[in-house]
Image (cartoon, rainbow, N blue to C red):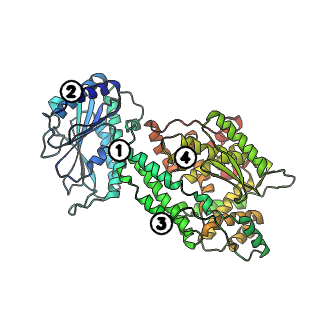
Amino acid sequence: MIDKKTKEAIANSLKTGNTLNMRLGKNIRFKIERRLPFLLVYRYKEGDKNPVSGLVVTESSYLIADSSTDNNSEVAILVKDLAKGIADDYGSVMIMEVWIGKPDSKTFVIKAAKDKAPNTVKALQEGLEKFSINHAGLDVVVEETTIRHADGISDFLTLKQCQEAGIYLLGLEIPPFFQGEHSGEFYYLVFKEFKRAFSGILRKSIFEFLRVQTSFDIENYQKLGSTAIDNAVWEVDKKLSEIEAKYQFLMLISPTNTLQAKEEFISSQHKINPKFLYRNLPVDPDRLKEELFSINLRDIEDPTLAFLYTEKREELEKQITMLKERGSKNFMYSSIRLYSSPGVNLFETAKYLLKTLPHDSYEDVKWIDCYDLAKICTNEIDKYREIYPKLDAKVEVKHDIVGMLVSRGQLYIGESFKVPEHRVQALVHHEVSTHVLTFYNGKMQPFDQMSSGFADYDELQEGLAVLAEYLVGGLTNNRLRILAARVIAGRTLIEGQTFEETYRTLTVEYGMTPEQAFQITARTYQGGGCTKDIIYLRGLIKLVDYLQNGGELEPLYVGKIGFKHIPLIQELKIRGIIKPSPLFPSYLKTAEAKDRLEKLKSGMDLPELVN
């Protein structure tokens, strides 16, 4: 029995457009967001173990009820009345009922009316056919029929009720291809893949219905996705962030004695491989892994967010494994799992750059030391703080690091570091206007992972950072040569060459200076061998390709995301989950940077990026 108070709450929700999410009795879940003229219905049979409810709860409007809920039930009559109210405003409402087919079925069956809403049916059919291509034996058929529900149960709504309320009724039978036909064994990864695909397929079909059959104003199918975030997401985000906050990965795999190791390497006439020392681990890797895998990701209903957090957990597992293996050969193999290895095309591009680009001359160059550089970086940070007062980044000069490093939004500069004056702005905008800026843009988003970084964010980050060097006019021959040499070093590492052999390859074959060759080789062999540095050139190449193919630059500064996340973050932005970013690189407002960006988009090769 649905009481008067519940009915009033439902009516008020539909009137105001607020989200309605409630249980009606023990067996019914009902949710409607934003007064959408659409409802997904699933009626389960007692004892059912199929996971269809997992497909349904990811959407913005749904009803889950037991199979006894028929057209005479209070719930069905309530849905009809609600639908009529919405249809009076928008012209029509679409209700789609889904169910599982027989155990031996391999066919998606779309049950639809003849010659009604053909674009809707076509979008659903094409989406399912595209998915089925990659799964042997699956196919899709459309049945023009008056029966739009599973066998063995009554109509949820009769066709007469639908006509009275302005409802377009569609049925979809889903084959249980994610379960063993005889064993009933559940194939979780297959189902997870379908769950992600099904959301997009469903929304495109609904979008076609709303666009053609109603007056409902919607400009993108992704807006049909849920704007609500379930509690499981916050719990997972919090726990992953807590684990990641227990260690600073880049700091812990970077040697503390690089300068001393360099002196010993030189004094041995490049014959003794350096012995690197590292900071003590502040964590127990095994216990950290236990915490990591105790996090329940399966409770995340939204398939996009579930994908992002599953990937992130896998990345953290790889990092923690590397911390445990630090100083051993296994460290290198784990780094390949995390960062990959230089492919043939990347390796050939690196060789081409090193053979093509001449050395820059450092004669009569004015050098800027770490302290003056820190002041310049601080001034740039202060400018961003005026725009976004919550930016609390600081610059710290440290004796135990080499070069520049951003960790958790803070910038560290090595005490021995100095830079040619003409490279200062390039480095400032590499570190501050990319790494620091995206950290704080990410920090104002609802998810902690937007600032700490979703999986594989490094490649896009470093691509953006090197692009900044080009856009401010500070990308030099030597800088591109160094990025290329890092790829060469990564290749020689995985081929089994020693530190000394890689150093000689860089100096003798590719003409790198002893200082450059040592720094590149040291970074490559740290921890036991690390391929991370190949991502700078690889990220730049991917970013240039993205921009030259029409990609937009501004959305990439939303936080620390990877290339593969661009459409996912765009989806979350359309759904209103990701908010507009407060910060945008200051240099992109200049005429010079805008001109350089347009030239790049129109088609430039890597050597042409040198300023």
Circle 3: element type: helix
Q: CA distance from mark 2 to mark 4?
A: 46 Å
**Residue at the farthest top position:** 88
CA gap, disc 2 to disc 1?
Answer: 34 Å
Q: Of callouts 2 and 1, which one flags the residue occurring earlier in the amino acid sequence?
A: 2
Q: Quick check: 365 left or right of 328?
A: right
Q: Are marks 3 and 2 in contact (CB under 8 Å)?
A: no
Q: Where does label 3 land, which residue?
A: 286
First in residue order: circle 3 vs circle 4: 3
Residue matched to label 1: 199
Q: Residues within 10 Å of mark 4 (few under 14, many from 20)?
A: many
Residue 564 picture location, percent across and down: 49, 50
Q: Secondary structure at mark 1?
A: helix
Q: Dot 3 surroundings within 10 Å: few (below 14), some, or many (20 or more)?
A: few
Q: Residue at coordinates 58% horizontally, 72% vertically from top-left?
A: 328
Element under disc 2 = helix
Q: CA distance from mark 1 to mark 4?
A: 27 Å
Please name whichever residue, 603 or 562, is drawn nearer the observer in this view of the structure. 562
In front: mark 3 or mark 4? 3
Q: Is residue 480 above or below residue 57?
A: below
Which image quadrant: the N terminus? top left
Mark closest to the chain's N terminus, 3 or 2 = 2
Tell me the kind of residue under disc 4: Ser
Which residue type does callout 2 highlight?
Lys
Q: Is residue 203 visible?
A: yes
Residues 153 and 205: in front is 153
* Image x and y of residue 4, in percent: 21, 27
Residue tagged 4: 451
